[in-house]
Image (cartoon, rainbow, N blue to C red):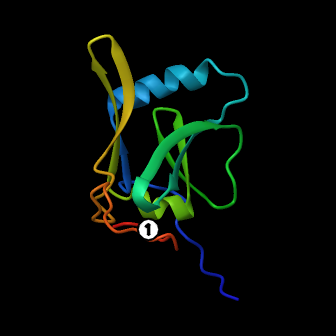
Amino acid sequence: MSDVQFNKRLTDEINVSAEAVKQLLAITESEDGVNGVRIFVSGGGCSGMTYGMTFVDQPTEFDCEWERDGLKVYVDSVAMGYLKGVEIDYQTQGSSASFVFKNVFAQTGGSGGCGGCGSSGGGCG
């Protein structure tokens, strides 16, 4: 058994724009019992990966933490492999606004599409 520990403090592995930090702080501060935001990755196969966020009351032992201006962002160690190089931004277009994950394929080299996926599963890259 090894005593090697992974780095739990994130620095430049992900980037959250100043506007996204501002918007996330406003949301988390209005919610009771929220300690921060979890970024998650799910899916795979022909549909590609899905990136999203949810509220966190407490981090887990497998979480890495990114912090700026009082905003805490948690990413579990498995999802981190899919998020290196990602920028989270907050964009407004007309009357709609949303959080946007940019450069999500920097680490995996994927394109979001998939050709020839079999029923046996497996990721597309």
Q: Secondary structure at mark 1?
A: loop
Depth check: 2 or 77 in front?
A: 77
In which quadrant of the rendered view does residue 102 lie?
Answer: top left
Q: Is residue 23 left or right of residue 17?
A: right
Q: Is residue 31 left or right of residue 81?
A: right
- Identity of the residue drawn at 67% across and 31% down: 34
Rendering coords of residue 11 (x, y %): 40, 54
Tell me how many marks there are: 1
Quadrant of the frame with the C terminus:
bottom left
- Identity of the residue drawn at 39% across and 26% down: 98
Q: Amino acid at mark 1?
A: Gly
Q: Residue furthest top?
A: 95
The answer to whether residue 52 of the structure is visible from this angle is yes
In which quadrant of the rendered view does residue 83 lie?
Answer: bottom left
- Identity of the residue drawn at 42% across and 24% down: 22
Rendering coords of residue 88 (x, y %): 37, 40
Q: Which residue position holds label 1? A: 123
- Identity of the residue drawn at 28% across and 50% down: 103
**21 w.r.t. 110: above or below:** above
Depth check: 3 or 125 in front?
A: 125
